[in-house]
Image: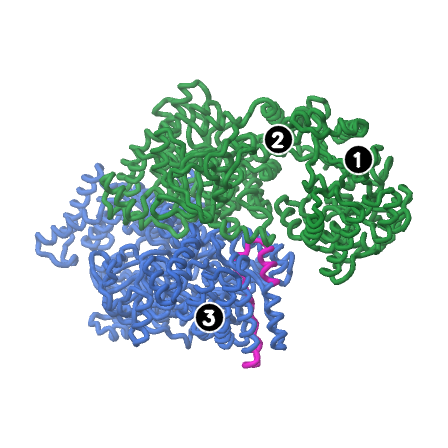
Chain colours: A blue, B green
Amino acid sequence: MKWVYSFGEGSGEGDASMKHLLGGKGANLAEMASLGLPVPPGFTITTEVCTAFYDNDRQYPDGLKAQVAAAIATVGAAVGRVFGDADKPLLVSVRSGARASMPGMMDTVLNLGLTDETVKGLASLAGDERFAYDSYRRFIQMYSNVVLELDHHEFEDILETYKEERDYFLDTELSADDWKSIVASYKGVVEKVRGKPFPQDPTEQIWGAIGAVFGSWRNDRAETYRRLHNIPESWGTAVNVQAMVFGNMGDTSATGVAFTRNPSTGENEYYGEFLINAQGEDVVAGIRTPQPLTKSAREAMGEEDPSLEEAMPKAYGELTAVFDKLEKHYRDMQDIEFTIQENKLWMLQTRNGKRTAKAAMKIAVDLCQEGLINREEAVLRVEPGSLDQLLHPSLDPNAPRDLVLAGLPASPGAASGEVVFSADEAERLSQEGRKVILVRVETSPEDIHGMHAAQAIVTARGGMTSHAAVVARGMGRPCVCGAGDLKIDNSGAFFTAGGRQVNKGDCVTVDGSAGKVFFGEVATMQPELSGDFATLMGWADNVRRMAVRANADTPHDAQVARNFGAQGIGLCRTEHMFFDAERIVAVREMILAEDKAGREAALAKLLPMQRSDFEDIFRVMSGLPVTVRLLDPPLHEFLPHSDDEIEEVAKSSGMDAQKLKDRAHKLQEFNPMLGHRGCRLGVSYPEIYEMQARAIVEAACTIAEETGERVTPEIMVPLVAKSEELSFLKKRIDDVASAVLKERNATLDYLVGTMIELPRAALTADEIAGDAEFFSFGTNDLTQTTFGLSRDDSASFLPDYLRRNILERDPFVTIDTQGVGALMEVAVEKGRKTRPQIKLGICGEHGGDPDSITFVENLGLDYVSCSPYRAPIARLAAAQAKLEERASSSNA
Amino acid sequence: MKWVYSFGEGSGEGDASMKHLLGGKGANLAEMASLGLPVPPGFTITTEVCTAFYDNDRQYPDGLKAQVAAAIATVGAAVGRVFGDADKPLLVSVRSGARASMPGMMDTVLNLGLTDETVKGLASLAGDERFAYDSYRRFIQMYSNVVLELDHHEFEDILETYKEERDYFLDTELSADDWKSIVASYKGVVEKVRGKPFPQDPTEQIWGAIGAVFGSWRNDRAETYRRLHNIPESWGTAVNVQAMVFGNMGDTSATGVAFTRNPSTGENEYYGEFLINAQGEDVVAGIRTPQPLTKSAREAMGEEDPSLEEAMPKAYGELTAVFDKLEKHYRDMQDIEFTIQENKLWMLQTRNGKRTAKAAMKIAVDLCQEGLINREEAVLRVEPGSLDQLLHPSLDPNAPRDLVLAGLPASPGAASGEVVFSADEAERLSQEGRKVILVRVETSPEDIHGMHAAQAIVTARGGMTSHAAVVARGMGRPCVCGAGDLKIDNSGAFFTAGGRQVNKGDCVTVDGSAGKVFFGEVATMQPELSGDFATLMGWADNVRRMAVRANADTPHDAQVARNFGAQGIGLCRTEHMFFDAERIVAVREMILAEDKAGREAALAKLLPMQRSDFEDIFRVMSGLPVTVRLLDPPLHEFLPHSDDEIEEVAKSSGMDAQKLKDRAHKLQEFNPMLGHRGCRLGVSYPEIYEMQARAIVEAACTIAEETGERVTPEIMVPLVAKSEELSFLKKRIDDVASAVLKERNATLDYLVGTMIELPRAALTADEIAGDAEFFSFGTNDLTQTTFGLSRDDSASFLPDYLRRNILERDPFVTIDTQGVGALMEVAVEKGRKTRPQIKLGICGEHGGDPDSITFVENLGLDYVSCSPYRAPIARLAAAQAKLEERASSSNA
């Protein structure tokens, strides 16, 4: 079994394709070596060793020790040194390197191999005793910290005290003898804390470091990082051991990091920083301020100290040649680490560089236009989720801020305004042209008008899929939810958070992307959607198979959706139309009616209003399909609840307060999510759905005539559990439609279908498809019922689940493929069995989640539907899903 | 195609096995004819005609008319008459006859074939003009009512007026001429209401009657009956046409109904009644009082008029010979209709007789002991659900009663007591030895002590599986739920219902089996569980494969369960133990604790109490397995809710009221059923489950030592959705158990398993079975989540579903095999794939439902668990399920 892969200038046993075995760093070191780039010789211990180590009760596999010893000898031979030799000691670095970059693990030990003996050899080889002891003290500190787990402070205190006593200010003021003293003190503290001396055997040192790398694979920080980034524990990490090169051998030496393009803007310019006479950790540690690489960057920053371009023009020239070679080779922007030892350039790392969404967009488009990649590759280069940064206003990163409150980043974007505590007040002030932030314990459908009027919403309760979050995302309003610290005073005059008080009318700024609320106004920046964005989205649309629709309830939302490239509406919720002040009276009349005749009288008042809602939406979406969901929420949502509200409504509407109260009480439910809602309302009161069907069909006829374009309403019956529910209601809808079309002497292509949002519907989709002309997966409710988990209540314990690794991802964000996804597969298969051409879509929140989009691309759905503001994300994700699907099927 | 099957004395084209084709009545008429019994000749039009009729837009199939005409001719030839002939007219009866007896359909038209002409022929043939016109007026009334759909009153009014005007009292006082007048008036009213004369063409008459029978198959009453009794619409009905025989030809004629044994008690004695000189409908109509068949019955009743045995000894002798022949032939008690025409006996119907549960039990045991059936057949003869009548006290059927309120029959049995409105008062009065009925809007876990103290429970809200219903059934308390009319006054001094007021302290009687509440005390009768009951249950236990366990939370319930033959506890809910006054303080302390240490301190107080609970239960169940479910309900159920309650608790416990309020508020949930409960509590606060595991294992060790018998606790983790939840918790439970066993130096066989009560658990049962040593199907919650239907909220709309035929049965009563059952099948298959010997049971309410028991027998579960009081039902149902399964697999 081969556990160790060597590399050195001109050749490598591995290559960049072997990341799973060698980790990212190791694979790229081997690749660079094979490319002939100047890479210090070294070797990689594979990820399989890590796996074997954990499978075998933290024992190393047989043969490893011998392979490592041989590889060290090879490295020594390449550089003319011997590991542990007193005269010509080989020093090495030991670094971790997983398949994916992973902060939180043990990072690096430099200068390994130094002992009280070998340090002398290093001093004489380098002709520089100060350099040798500086390296030794660095090694002791680093090794003691990451391998022996001593705190940094133990060492920093010694150094600080030593400097203070001697009035030294900079480390460079310390002489070789000073460092010798420091080394002695460092060794002393190690022995004191650990009870045994600092290891003087280089072999013990290297196994200590290797063990620390493997051990850190399962430390808490690494586990947390893996969970957040969906990295399987089974991948394991590799260990890279490499001959040391020294950036700290005087003024002809240096060390630095660089990007081949600007990772913030994407501009095609060299970008990076370096330090003369330093080792790698100095750049990161911030003890000295690094200088920019290029002259132009230095000038732009107004710096005096020379850039690398100026200070070491030859090495700089070699470096930029390497940049160009690597970018062409890897066909992407690279993130590089390098060291210059006595004017010779050494490459320590290269990898695809992280970048902002904006930079990703620009780099992808530029690389394509430079001919390095094709359009499909460009489409794959941008993380769809990252577009969120581009689609909403964001806080100016340079603006000062004063945090008041933190919660969940429930709906992205940033906005400022004055604090209000009621939806009515939000609406009133907004009508006066004032910008307001609506702050509530939680929101309900009665707050919709206030949420619409507000610039942003903040709630104390509720999770990422609470009412506030879902509605805010749909409206594109920034929203921070579940801010547990938020306490709204009963007086309604102020709220407190973390001991501070914020009054009604005070200005705050909400950053929905970060889940934060700041005091006062923080400057924001507007999104730009033309240029590279438009170019890349166009390329994406060309490869995409699935249509992208939006969930939109108002003409305004529909217009936003069209602007963001939505190809129809996948979910138009009709209940929001019921809350308007003028309408709610008729709605309540209907609810309080004693009989069908009374309900029909109230519904007759609602009909023209609903019809005009649909006309406005159909007009905006003219030519595109619109899926209208019939009334879904339980009726009690439309009634006032508290005694005060009831009194108020009774007074203003002339209804009997006691009757209102009785009805509200009677309609109250233990579990409204599982109650009298959805098609159950239609079964109890078919006249409600009949009114809605009439409003839809009449509006469609009117707009088709007005615009001359095709109007295609898709009438969606929610919460079907049994085919009989849909059969019962479809017949009534069809009867109404026939009647309207006869009255108008018109024709209309409309569909009747259902949401698949209950396990039973998925399990009996073959029967339901008998009447359903389309299925739209309502994955929010399907997730709630499949897990038996209320999304409004899960925020209190899901963190425990994530923390304990019981849940890897929030199932309300990404489809749980094993449970919810399994039911979707059953539904697709059974639905198509009955009706091969059945139209299939998804309109749950998952419709805007890239991973979920990949899943439904593989299921073969016809479209996804998401918030208007997520439509571009969905367009890109759907394109990528198609490309991945194509790649995997051509591989298969 | 043969649409018509003839029969007559000595032969029949059909037989008793052809009920699907000939209906019950037709098949048995053919069978009796073949047996040589005196059956008037006739024929049956098959159920296939009914199906064809409805499939073909209410048109009769080709060839039917000719076959009917030929069959009528054959009947006429057999009796020497001709249908429609003026001199020797053939008269026939037309009766419906479905596969199962079905009230609500058109029943019977007698004397068909009479017209203004043929009535004269009948008069001269019989030599009795009065008889002929009496028959004619009966025919007009009956035909007009059931075929022409005229109201009874139209005719009764004419007859009453006629009699009043002439001072007649009895019908027998009317002469032939009187009947002629009446006939004329009857025909007049028909013509007036229907706009055309009463049909004078016998062929038109017979097709009218046949059409009415087929039409009545789909009338509302028939559809309702079918829905309630799960009779498929596709079965259709047959029509029986038979030559008339006349019980109204003077004092040598009679008509009657009989049972071969007493259908009320099961005693082996002839039982029935008859009328001399009457037609069949007179016996039922109650115009004259029928006499008993036997002398002994007449004497027992103190009647003067002679019995059939005395009045017509020869016919009686023939009849009892027929009884014996039929009972031997059908091997069951028969329900018979007969007519005696001029001393000759004619058999009009036989069928297996309906009987009370008590009679069913006795008849089954007697028939077996008489050698007519074997023990397995006896076991199949008793409807398991009917045992409910035997297991609880019931109202004395003869006691007078005054209905106050009706609701759902949520828990069977009857009890009287004084009305109280709070659980505390129920407990207080009961401790004084008073019997109380607890009347509440709804109950919550805080009411448990009051429910236990009460004789019965009545609630205004909640369905058959509401908290009140479930708990009451578990405790064996009669309960009426969802009594919508019940309004409890805010004063707590009285309730009103239907305009009447019932004060606190007034006595009421609750009949939980009927869902009724009566004013005052109604006499009740106690159940008898020995004798035939014990015999039959013993036979059932011998054939049963599945074990029967009970759901029991207290030592008392456990004892009841053992007495009722339960073989273990399938569900011991631990939360009820938390509500005891002494414990709730510690529970609340735990909930209010700021950190794990605080929670552990409170849990330490609960540990000895829980341990002693388990000790008591293990002692009662010694030698049998006990499945203990770890804490399931959300924590807010243990906190007070209203401001008043909070103040009270704060005062009595010394807790901070504001802190209590804040915590209660924070724990409040939108959908508690889908909230922070079940194993989610265990994940958030593992220390709770650890305390419970310790209590269980310590108690088991103690009782095993004390009794020397095996104690087998099965520790059940509720609400698992992901295998990771169970893995996490099982490890903690096993660690605690190991620690306890080490402390005690003991060994213990215990299992750790889970409820399968969420769709996701069923779908991923293969993974869950990795850690689960048993699955117990929690079909209540599985039904709730599969349907997305809250059982506490469904009562408001399920009636709409049943009424509209969208739902055939309440899925909370009988397992929905298509949805919930499909998930159970998946779970069984996947669970066994991972762990072939996994123990499988069901502990939802369905565990006591006979149809659901049949379903899970076929799934191959190891046991069912139900309320203690339903254990005998489950034992019998499980035995029948096994027998049916065996029969169907031997047929296959």
Q: Circles 2 and 3: CB distance less than 8 Å? A: no
Magenta stretch: residue A712 in it?
Answer: yes
Marks 1 and 2 in Cβ contact (< 8 Å): no
Crowd around label 2: few <14 · some 14–19 · many ≥20 (10 Å): many
Q: Identify the residue under disc 3.
A: A372
The range drawn in magenta is: A704-731
Q: Quadrant of the C terminus of chain B?
A: top right
What residue lies at 18% left-to-right and 51% top-to-bottom?
A156
Place of residue A676 in the rendered image (x, y in percent of width and height, measured from the top left) = 48, 55
Q: Is residue A733 visible?
A: yes
The residue carrying mark 1 is: B251
Instruction: Indicate whether B237 appears above or below B196.
Output: above
**Residue B879: mark:** 2
Task: State which chain disc 3 sits on.
Answer: A
State the residue at coordinates (25%, 45%): B647
**Observer-nearest of B615 and A122:** B615
What kind of element bears circle 3?
Answer: loop
Q: Which dot, 1 or 2, sits closer to the camera?
A: 1
Taking the image as shown, residue B364 lies to the left or right of residue A135, namely: right
Q: Residues within 10 Å of mark 3 (few under 14, many from 20)?
A: some
Q: Hey, what amino acid is under mark 1?
A: Asp
- Give the distance between the C-alpha atoms of the residues marked 1 and 2, in whole angstroms: 51 Å
